[in-house]
Amino acid sequence: MYTPVSSRAASAYRQVGVQSFVDNATPHMLIKMLFDGLMQSLNAARGAMQRGEIDEKGRHLGKAVRIIEEGLKGGLNPEQGGDIAANLRALYDYCVKRLTLANLRNDITLVEEVVELITPVAQSWEQIGAGNQGGGA
């Protein structure tokens, strides 16, 4: 299929913009981006489940699991994080199990459970960032 040059150029420009943003992001901003991406994937998976789009559901849940495993869980530092890191690792492991089960059973309530578990962690992470920027709560 032919893609117009202007469309390819716009796509390349977006990729460069995203890469520049990632390259210049602080570690805190990168984790926030992971949480944002995770929530987008979970919401997209819920929508796909509601519409009966099995392939899309699997793709979005797979992306969510990768974000948790490779990004959030992979970024934990047990030496510095102590009990908090251990508790987050256990939470992330539980979420991965629930998302895997949600995919196998096509059960939207399991995805919603993960959203409810991750949302307070993501919000807390965002508040930590706001407090460290000197701008207030």
Image: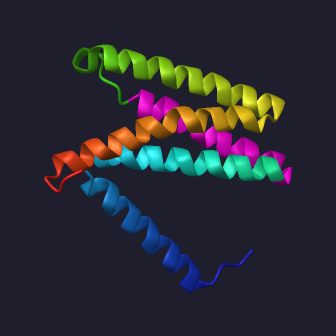
Q: Quadrant of residue 106?
A: top right
**Residue 65, can we see it?**
no
Residue at 40% in and 62% down? 18
Is residue 3 one of those drawn in magenta? no
Residue at 58% in and 27% down? 95
- Name the spot of residue 94 as percent of width and height, x first: 57, 20
- Name the spot of residue 115 as percent of width and height, x first: 58, 39
Is residue 73 one of those drawn in magenta? yes
Judge left or right: residue 114 versus residue 11.
Answer: right
Residue at 32% in and 60% down? 21
Pick out the residue farthest to the right: 52
- Name the spot of residue 45 as percent of width and height, x first: 70, 47
Judge left or right: residue 118 versus residue 86.
Answer: right
Q: Nearer the viewer, residue 83 or 21?
A: 83
Q: Quadrant of residue 62?
A: top right
**Residue 42, can we see it?**
yes
Main SS, magenta region, reads helix
Judge left or right: residue 16 versus residue 68.
Answer: left
Image quadrant containing the N terminus: bottom right
Residue at 66% in and 26% down? 98
Judge left or right: residue 95 versus residue 84.
Answer: right
Q: Is residue 4 above or below residue 62?
A: below
Q: Which residues are magenta?
A: 51-74
